[in-house]
Image (cartoon, helix red, strand yellow):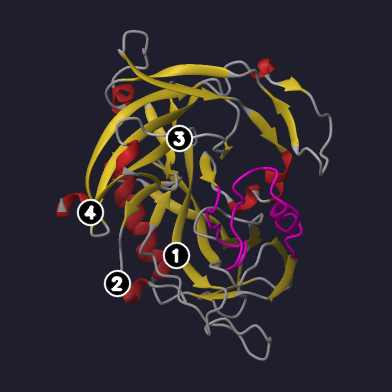
Amino acid sequence: HSQQQTTRLEIVVYCSIFDRGELCFVGRTWKSNVFAVTLQQQASPPPIQNYWFYVKAAPSESKWIVVELVAQTRSAGVVTSQISLGWSVLRLFENIRALIDVHPSENHNDPLQRQSKPQSVYLWQGSPLHLLVSADTASIPETATKLSFRFFTFKKLSHLAHLLSNDCIAGGDNAIDGLGDALALPATPFDTDWAQLCRLQLTEFRISSPVIVLPDGFDTQMLQTLTAIRKESFGGSDDATCARIVARELSICCFNGRNIIAEPSMIQLQVDAHNHHVLAWHGEINMNVTANLHHNCWLLISFYVEIAWNDKPSSVQSPQYHHRICVGREVVSMTSAQLIVSGAQRTELTLAPQYSWIDDRPIFNNSNSDSNSN
């Protein structure tokens, strides 16, 4: 009897995006709010009705929305066990023409522009991990749990789409970084709070004349390291393989932990005529971001170098291979004291090569401070 008083049964909905072409899950798994079940309801749990969640994804017939219903027990505030009640896939993009254009333009009375016909399926037994082996779901046994649903398009979400990562699922009451401390996604598309979210303010700021100071021997060490990596990992086998720097770029953008929330500013750096350790760009960068930058937003600065390889420099016909390498990166909170926003003096940051890539492929983790570019 005491255990019944301290342990309670809950139901949770999990949603994720699965790419059946690649046989992999993409993005993050979304978890709904908890639906508590009382002792009187345990024999027949109440249905979950009129529950909304939002999907941001590029339309592709290979993408499925995977929905799983999970029962869990909680004791003293801790989840002690979980069991799947069934799962299914929603083929959101399989027949886009099935979405009926019932509202040609956005309006405040009914924000849903398109809707599909009502659909229903019985949940399957087992686990969604079955999809990692095979996308064939025809032979999976069904449960007695029925899922009914409709698809809608919701244009108001486009006002906040830049704050959400690609292939993202979100639900009501989810806090989104960049909205503000007191704001979250409304539970339904008809909530009046959407009007406030759609009035998210545009923030403007300016960055003047960025300069990078390289430590002694930085270019030489970098080229030697990358040449060795190319010989080992990219097929270069000739001892004469050499690399040279073609261009240097500085990328500046804003990041909210989910997505780049404004178009990055790409700056072509030039070597200073009087000091070859100094890379500079003279001018001003105006950045416009539709977000509350005081709410969990960061300034993301990346230093890129474009490298050209030639495995046989003595041969005129030997092809050149170009790669873009990130050799330094720093993420600074927009509310950090490191950022001097008044313009009274320069902000100084260290771009550490702790995370480095060749064409988005991680190649080494070097935290040696002597190799940092300031």
> Identity of the amino acid at label 4?
Gln
Can residue 368 be spotted in the picture?
A: yes
Q: Is residue 121 above or below residue 114?
A: above
Asked if disc 2 and disc 3 are in contact, CB closer than 8 Å, the reply is no
Name the disc covering residue 318, or none: 3
Residue under numbered circle 4 = 5
> Identity of the amino acid at label 2?
Asn
Q: CA distance from mark 2 to mark 3?
A: 35 Å
Residue under numbered circle 2 = 368
Classify mark 2: residues with Cα within 10 Å, few (<14), some (14-19) or many (20+): few
Residue at x 30%, y 36% (from the top left corner) = 42
Q: Is residue 285 above or below residue 325?
A: below
Image coords of residue 185 (percent x, y): 60, 52
Q: In this picture, which residue range is highlighted in magenta?
A: 172-201
Q: CA distance from mark 1 to mark 2?
A: 12 Å
* Secondary structure at numbered mark 3: loop
Q: Is residue 209 above or below residue 34?
A: below
* Secondary structure at numbered mark 4: helix
Image coords of residue 297 (percent x, y): 56, 66
Q: In this image, 330 relative to 197: left or right?
A: left
> Identity of the amino acid at label 3?
Ser
